[in-house]
Image (tube, helix red, strand yellow):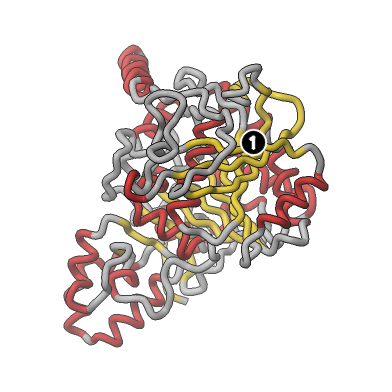
């Protein structure tokens, strides 16, 4: 026990050492400088207002749901790195070098909210709702999502839902309870969007502890209304800080007509290693190996797509924010996932078809085998088995022999009883217990 406590305290010290985030950046500049790019956001929160207008909202719990329309300025491309938020080293910030807040306009009624959505809707009429994770200040969630939306080039109207986080690694339990405190408000936000005539499609993207809040809000909606609203088509869980057994129950509660789920996982996620230790040593969903049983077969049966970012390098020392810091992943989010497309399809190259892909790289027969071995992003899609068979047959036995050693990876990706009957129509899956032996077989 003593050794475990020392390990946890050591990890907390490491995490605390990665802080140093600037505060007080929410004071509006009132102008957009030439060469910069604006990102218009709708920001909903359950945080208590701060007396300091440069902060707007602190980490304590507020009463009711408060909404603001915020415009963030992004520096010119020549002065920044894709995947990074350029925080100012001192205030006032330089818009040509740093992210800045251009305007903050309170939205005080549903009518004002509908009017703002209508005036800021894109051609797609698609909304992307972002739910941040543990240890986040208000301005961090706003600026991080502005970065994701800008860098992904997404044709979406962005909405941030930010819940009360004290932004301290020593307040894990407070933050976790704050997600439960905010569950009704997120469900209300999603319901308003789903009922808005200016919105055709809603995608939810949640990170870390925010994935618990997002899935719980959807579960509550499904129980209350008998289903998740049809406009909520896509759910992206990045580094989900979710107990795998609990997620299985949550997923089953969403009913048969549930949204499409995509997971970003990384087995070297140090933040989730800590969470696992303090949460009963049960696997966290964001740290699983999707190529290993029982997860491979269970995820495939459930129709859940997994992107394994373990081999992907990023500037995040904790390996907990790869989904936002990697240009490849950010482009993938913008190009395919938010648009409701599958990561793989029947015409992709062999490298993708067997479960590994270097995003943006040419997929050819000559490079397929090397892609499997070296690709930084591994894609485990419910259609992989079907695609694999078709591609191997098309390319002949020689190629089939070359990639035969990675056949297990090809049968990629949770318990039909726990997760329900999925849409991965190519396999049946039998599982003994939540994490017992499993078997995938062709139908």
Q: Is residue 44 above or below residue 152?
A: above
The one of 339 and 90 positioned closer to us in this rendering: 90
* Residue that extends furthest to the top in the rendered view of this protein: 2
Q: Secondary structure at mark 1?
A: strand
Report whether 406 appears left or right of 180: left
Regarding residue 222, the answer to whether it shows in the image is no
Q: Where in the figure is residue 15, as x and y percent of width and height?
A: 36, 24
Q: Quadrant of residue 65?
A: top right
Q: Where in the figure is residue 235, as x and y percent of width and height?
A: 56, 54
**Residue, x 24% and y 64% (percent of image)?**
372
The one of 405 and 332 positioned closer to us in this rendering: 332
**Residue, x 30% and y 86% (percent of image)?**
393
Report whether 372 appears left or right of 142: left
Report whether 358 appears left or right of 239: left
Report the number of numbered marks.
1
**Residue, x 26% and y 50% (percent of image)?**
311
Q: Is residue 419 above or below residue 167?
A: below
**Residue, x 55% and y 45% (percent of image)?**
247
Q: Quadrant of residue 371?
A: bottom left
Please state, as top left, top right, bottom left or bottom right, where the N terminus lies in the image: top left
Residue position marked by numbered label 1 in the rendering: 104
Regarding residue 83, the answer to whether it shows in the image is yes
Q: Where in the figure is residue 275, as x and y percent of width and height?
A: 43, 30
The one of 406 and 197 positioned closer to us in this rendering: 197
Q: Residues within 10 Å of mark 1 (few under 14, many from 20)?
A: many
Q: Where in the figure is residue 326, as x and y percent of width and height?
A: 34, 49
């Amino acid at each position: 026990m003593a050794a475990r406590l020392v390990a946890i305290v050591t990890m907390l010290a490491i995490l605390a050492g990665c802080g140093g985030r600037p505060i007080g950046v929410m004071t509006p500049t009132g102008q957009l400088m030439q060469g910069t790019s604006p990102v218009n956001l709708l920001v909903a929160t359950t945080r208590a207002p701060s007396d300091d207008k440069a902060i707007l909202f602190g980490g304590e719990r507020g009463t009711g749901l408060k909404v603001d329309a915020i415009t963030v300025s992004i520096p010119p491309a020549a002065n920044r790195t894709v995947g990074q938020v350029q925080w100012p080293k001192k205030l006032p910030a330089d818009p040509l070098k740093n992210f800045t807040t251009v305007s903050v306009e309170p939205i005080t009624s549903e009518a004002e909210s509908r009017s703002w959505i209508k005036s800021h809707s894109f051609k797609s009429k698609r909304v992307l709702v972002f739910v941040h994770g543990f240890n986040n200040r208000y301005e961090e969630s706003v600026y991080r999502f502005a970065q994701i939306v800008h860098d992904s080039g997404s044709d979406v109207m962005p909405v941030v839902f930010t819940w009360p986080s004290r932004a301290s690694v020593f307040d894990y339990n407070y933050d976790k309870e704050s997600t439960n405190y905010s569950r009704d408000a997120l469900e209300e936000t999603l319901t308003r969007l789903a009922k808005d005539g200016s919105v055709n499609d809603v995608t939810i993207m949640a990170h870390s502890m925010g994935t618990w809040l997002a899935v719980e809000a959807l579960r509550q909606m499904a129980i209350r209304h008998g289903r998740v609203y049809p406009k909520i088509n896509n759910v992206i869980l990045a580094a989900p800080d979710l107990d795998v057994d609990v997620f299985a129950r949550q997923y089953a509660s969403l009913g048969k007509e549930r949204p499409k789920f995509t997971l970003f996982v990384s087995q070297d996620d140090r933040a989730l290693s800590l969470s696992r230790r303090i949460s009963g040593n049960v696997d966290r969903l964001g740290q699983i190996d999707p190529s290993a049983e029982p997860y491979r077969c269970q995820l495939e049966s459930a129709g859940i797509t997994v992107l394994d970012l373990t081999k992907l390098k990023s500037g995040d020392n904790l390996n907990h924010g790869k989904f936002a810091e990697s240009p490849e992943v950010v482009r993938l989010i913008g190009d395919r996932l938010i648009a409701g497309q599958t990561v793989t399809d029947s015409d992709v190259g062999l490298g993708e078809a067997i479960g590994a892909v270097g995003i943006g790289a040419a997929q050819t027969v000559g490079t397929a085998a090397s892609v499997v071995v070296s690709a930084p992003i591994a894609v485990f899609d419910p259609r992989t088995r079907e695609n694999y068979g078709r591609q191997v047959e098309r390319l002949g036995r020689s190629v089939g022999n070359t990639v035969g050693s990675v056949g297990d990876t090809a049968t990629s990706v949770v318990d039909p009883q726990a997760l329900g009957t999925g849409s991965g129509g190519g396999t049946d899956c039998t599982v003994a217990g939540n994490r017992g032996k499993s078997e995938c077989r062709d139908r």
